[in-house]
Image (cartoon, coloured by chain):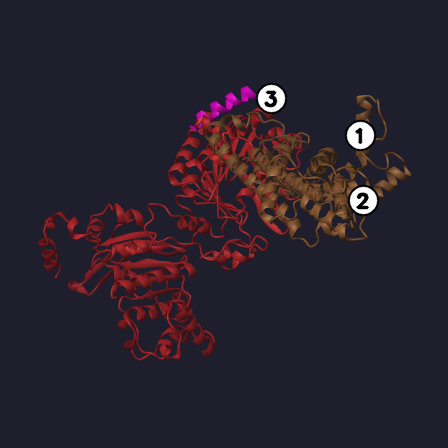
Chain colours: A red, B brown
């Protein structure tokens, strides 16, 4: 038996706008599918196509419901199919403003089943009750209902004829979280009792994740990734899905929200090759030349030439010791680490846990005794031969102490352009202008006075930004930052972290942030690796490690993390008179 | 206001049914406010109607002084008596109060020209004007709105292009020109309708049916000219409303429900597009009674208010003019009140 819904190579063109390009989908009876994507990705057009609202010549390809082709079907066939077999709840639940809600809920019952007015009204009442909608609402006009009530009424109308396929276009848009949650629960229980197949179209990822067992990510009218929801939304692998999930605020997110760099493509001029390549952190020549097919990768289908996010940096079983003979201390005991394109990984651990050693090995400045570091699948060379240099430049390191790291004899301009001088890239003029651009990129002035300044004339925060500009000027793929803020005051630290995050998103860098400060790391990174005495004791998403750590080390670091709370709240110091404050002040001093 | 076939077909559940409890007090309060505003407008109109002619240069007595006028009076004493008779020698405040008091009694004064009570003149003329305007506008509403619905629903189609060209063309002719052409073609050349008047003179002892047929026969052409002059506006507004509704989300919602075209066209699109048209229908009542009637009744020698105004202007028959203006103004504001009330009934959103 054929699937309930089969979409093959569906393309829709409105004038010079490509709304959908080669979308193929399948949905069996009782299954659920979420279609997610940004505004303008073609989600609503897809919904309209599934009910035959878009017809040739605008639409090409095939949309079949229950084996019946919708594209090119005659109006009577479509009319018979609509609402009986496939019911679409449009975005925003639009109602005819001059007719009561009840009339509009019972309308399909009368039109399709030929029910009389009284019978249809009674049935509408039952449907409303099933949706936990006050039946009095049916006698009202649409404008007299709240947003939540309108959605419920729309749902009551959608399920009125027991359709085999229900399509919900942005079912929760504009609703407050509690109402949205109620509505989602209602849809879930309806789907369970009535057994209809469900297509949810939404930019609300949590709603989509709760409603559908499978998900598809749509970008510029194309499917980027499809598969089980817990994979596609839980562990997205296409760079776009990954960025989309990262841009979504959820309570578990601890780091700052990260917008997807760039902006969605102009639908009149979708980029050639992979449509996401201008915004993709890992795009290469092949991405703007060839269109990637939707292929199986990592347990789902992904439209990416690299099968999804590339692994930028892999460290496998690193060992390293210092000194010789008896005095030799072993600092790393088999540390492994991967960093994917565009990802920010935090490495935390107490002093002496081997963080800095790891950072230097990852950046290629220190060779491990055993184990290997691979950059984009190729071993990171340890030599300084000419051929190796270009590859090594792809990983850059920012150190803890900028006074130490930057030569006091060079001016700011010289410091920033030095990497280009070493690489012998372009002529002197180009290097100077690149240096100025880079300085502006990290929020520093480019006045002649500043360019001629030397390190002792700058503040710590400014110096660290100069160091960052110096690292970024060679356009690395991976940036390793070792305690970049530990010498800075809180304000300068905040500024540098914001800057780091901005440049990280803007340049699509993979970032390794090494720090002992959990509060700092969790604001910037996606994943945290906890190091203790040269071993990885814990690894996981930043929000989990920073809120519910499993390892003793991480828990200790969490307990020691700074919290701003009134002293009165501390039971140990709780005294009713002023003495408490004085005592606290004394202790603090 | 329910002339367009099928537009207002009754919904499954009566619109008032559930809204009754919460809406009832609000609606009557709203109705009361509307009525108060209406009465205030009427009072202002009456006042303007009293002062405006007195602010104009020249007065009826001047006409008596002008040897070229048929009403020329030589006797100075007689002129003074006439002035006193009409109360024109008294202070304006007193005249105003008297005017209001007379109006309250239904006394609109006496026509200077015909020397009969103005109220009697109006009672004789008003029904003809109401008949003409009523028939003309009803036809305009039916033709204009239904053509607008049809045209807008198939925007860009063959019918739409033809109707648009037709109505735009017709609406560019002035009413008196249309009236003259129509009179020449249909009455003079073809002889289908009588040349002038509202009924065949000196006919008596006819049956009730013959009389009605006679009135209708006389009415047909003037009413048709009025309908054609107004219908283009109705058509254009209704068409624009329909075109606006074509892209409305709720229409798409009705379509995905698998409803029939007819229901989408009337219940979803036309019913909503009707709302702006209602305001225009009422606004055109004012244009029709105060402008078109004068041209049309004059051209067709139709015994209505418009003709009376035309004659009264030539004779400076002030009491008649004043009364006519008052009646026309009242008709206009009453039509607007009617539109307001109809709007309230048609659009549930303005009720709350």
In this view, the residue in front, A407 or A14, is A14
Magenta highlight: main SS: helix
Residue annotated with mark 2: B178
In this view, the residue in front, A152 or A197, is A152
Task: Name the residue located 29 percent from the left edge and 65 percent from the top edge.
Answer: A492
In the rendered view, would you say A335 is above or below A440?
above
Whether A125 is among the magenta residues is yes
Q: Nearer the viewer, mark 3 or mark 2?
A: 2
Residue annotated with mark 3: A114
Q: Residue furthest right?
A: B189
How crowded is the residue under tag 2: few (<14 C-alpha within 10 Å), some, or many (20+)?
some
Mark 2 chain: B
Q: Secondary structure at mark 3?
A: loop
Task: Name the residue located 65 percent from the left edge and 53 percent from the top edge.
Answer: B55
Q: Is residue A339 left or right of residue A287?
A: left
Q: Is residue A516 left or right of residue B343?
A: left
Residue annotated with mark 1: B215
Earlier in the chain: of badge 2 and badge 1, it is 2
Answer yes or no: is residue A365 visible. Answer: yes
The location of residue B136, given as percent across then percent down, is 74, 36
Answer yes or no: is residue A369 visible. Answer: no
The location of residue A444, given as percent across then percent down, is 37, 70
Task: Name the residue located 47 percent from the left edge and 52 percent from the top edge.
Answer: A306
Magenta span of residues: A116-133
**Circle 2/circle 1 CB separation < 8 Å:** no
In the rendered view, would you say A17 is above or below A103?
below
């Amino acid at each position: 038996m054929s699937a309930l819904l089969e979409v093959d190579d569906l393309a829709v063109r409105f004038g010079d706008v490509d709304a959908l390009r080669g979308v193929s989908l399948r949905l069996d009876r009782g299954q659920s599918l979420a279609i997610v994507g940004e505004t303008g990705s073609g989600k609503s057009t897809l919904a309209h196509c599934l009910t035959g609202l878009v017809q040739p010549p605008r639409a090409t390809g095939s949309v079949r419901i229950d084996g019946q082709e919708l594209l090119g079907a005659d109006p009577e066939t479509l009319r018979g199919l609509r609402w009986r077999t496939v019911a679409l709840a449009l975005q925003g639940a639009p109602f005819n403003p001059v007719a009561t809600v009840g009339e509009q809920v019972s309308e399909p019952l009368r039109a399709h089943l030929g029910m009389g007015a009284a019978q249809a009204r009674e049935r509408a009442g039952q449907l409303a009750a099933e949706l936990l909608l006050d039946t009095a609402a049916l006698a009202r006009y649409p404008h007299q209902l709240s947003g939540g009530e309108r959605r419920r009424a729309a749902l009551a109308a959608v399920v009125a004829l027991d359709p085999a396929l229900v399509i919900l276009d942005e079912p929760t848009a504009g609703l407050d979280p509690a109402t949205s949650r109620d509505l989602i629960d209602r849809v879930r229980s309806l789907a369970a009792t009535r057994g209809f197949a469900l297509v949810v179209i939404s930019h609300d990822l949590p709603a989509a994740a709760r409603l559908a067992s499978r998900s598809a990510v749509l970008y510029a009218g194309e499917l980027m990734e499809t598969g089980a929801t817990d994979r596609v939304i839980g562990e997205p692998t296409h760079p776009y899905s990954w960025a989309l999930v990262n841009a979504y605020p959820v309570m578990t997110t601890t780091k700052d929200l990260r917008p997807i760099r760039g902006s969605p493509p102009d639908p009149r001029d979708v980029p050639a090759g992979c449509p996401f390549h201008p915004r993709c952190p890992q795009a290469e020549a092949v991405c703007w030349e060839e269109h990637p097919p939707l292929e199986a990768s990592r347990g789902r289908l992904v439209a990416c030439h690299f099968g999804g996010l590339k692994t930028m940096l892999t460290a496998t079983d690193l060992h390293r010791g210092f000194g010789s003979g008896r005095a030799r201390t072993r600092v790393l005991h088999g540390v492994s680490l991967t960093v994917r394109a565009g990802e920010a990984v935090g490495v935390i651990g107490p002093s002496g846990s081997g963080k800095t050693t790891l950072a230097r090995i990852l950046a290629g400045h220190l060779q491990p005794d055993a184990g290997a570091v691979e950059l984009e699948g190729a071993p990171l060379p340890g030599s300084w031969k000419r051929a190796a240099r270009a590859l090594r430049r792809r990983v850059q390191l920012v150190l803890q102490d900028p006074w130490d790291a930057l030569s006091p004899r060079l001016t700011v301009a010289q410091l920033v352009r030095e990497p280009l001088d070493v690489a012998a890239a372009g002529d002197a003029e180009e290097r100077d202008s690149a240096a100025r651009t880079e300085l502006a990129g990290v929020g520093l002035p480019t006045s002649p006075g500043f360019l001629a300044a030397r390190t002792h004339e700058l503040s710590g925060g400014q110096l660290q930004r100069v160091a960052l500009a110096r690292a970024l000027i060679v356009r690395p793929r991976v940036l390793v930052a070792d305690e970049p803020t530990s010498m800075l005051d809180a304000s300068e630290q905040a500024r540098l972290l914001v800057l780091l995050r901005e440049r990280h998103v803007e340049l699509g860098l993979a970032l390794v942030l090494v720090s002992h400060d959990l509060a700092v790391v969790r604001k910037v990174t996606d994943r945290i690796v906890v190091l203790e005495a040269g071993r990885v004791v814990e690894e996981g998403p930043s929000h989990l490690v920073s809120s519910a750590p499993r390892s003793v080390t991480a828990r200790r670091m969490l307990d020691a993390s700074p919290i701003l709370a009134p002293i009165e709240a501390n039971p140990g110091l709780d005294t009713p008179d002023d003495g408490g404050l004085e005592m606290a002040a004394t202790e603090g001093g | 206001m329910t002339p367009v076939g099928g537009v207002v077909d009754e919904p499954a559940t009566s619109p008032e049914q559930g809204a009754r409890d919460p809406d009832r007090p609000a609606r009557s309060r709203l109705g009361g406010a509307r009525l108060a505003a209406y009465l205030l407008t009427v009072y202002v109109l009456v006042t303007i109607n009293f002062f405006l002619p007195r602010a104009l240069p020249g007065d009826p007595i001047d006409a008596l002084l002008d040897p070229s006028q048929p009403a020329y009076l030589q006797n100075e004493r007689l002129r003074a008596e006439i002035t006193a008779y009409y109360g024109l020698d008294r202070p304006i405040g007193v005249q105003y109060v008297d005017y209001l008091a007379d109006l309250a009694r239904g006394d609109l004064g006496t026509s200077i020209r015909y020397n009969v009570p103005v109220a009697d003149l109006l009672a004789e003329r008003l029904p003809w004007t109401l008949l003409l305007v009523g028939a003309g506008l009803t036809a305009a509403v039916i033709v204009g709105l239904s053509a607008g619905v049809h045209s807008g629903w198939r925007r860009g189609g063959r019918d739409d292009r033809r109707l648009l060209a037709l109505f735009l063309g017709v609406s560019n002719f002035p009413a008196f020109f249309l009236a003259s052409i129509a009179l020449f073609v249909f009455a003079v050349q073809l002889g289908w309708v009588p040349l002038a008047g509202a009924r065949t003179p000196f006919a008596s002892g006819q049956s009730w049916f013959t009389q009605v047929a006679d009135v209708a026969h006389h009415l047909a052409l003037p009413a048709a000219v009025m309908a054609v002059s107004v219908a283009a506006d109705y058509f254009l507004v209704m068409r624009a409303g329909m075109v606006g509704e074509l892209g409305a989300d709720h229409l798409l919602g009705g379509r995905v429900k698998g409803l029939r075209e007819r229901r989408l066209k009337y219940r979803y699109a036309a019913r909503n597009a009707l709302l702006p048209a209602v305001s225009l229908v009422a606004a055109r009542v004012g244009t029709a009674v105060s402008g078109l009637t004068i041209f049309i009744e004059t051209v067709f020698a139709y015994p209505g208010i418009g003709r009376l105004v035309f004659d009264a202007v030539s004779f400076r028959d002030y009491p008649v003019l004043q009364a006519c203006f008052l009646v026309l103004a009242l008709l206009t504001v009453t039509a607007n009140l009617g539109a307001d009330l109809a709007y309230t009934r048609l659009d549930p959103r303005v009720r709350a």
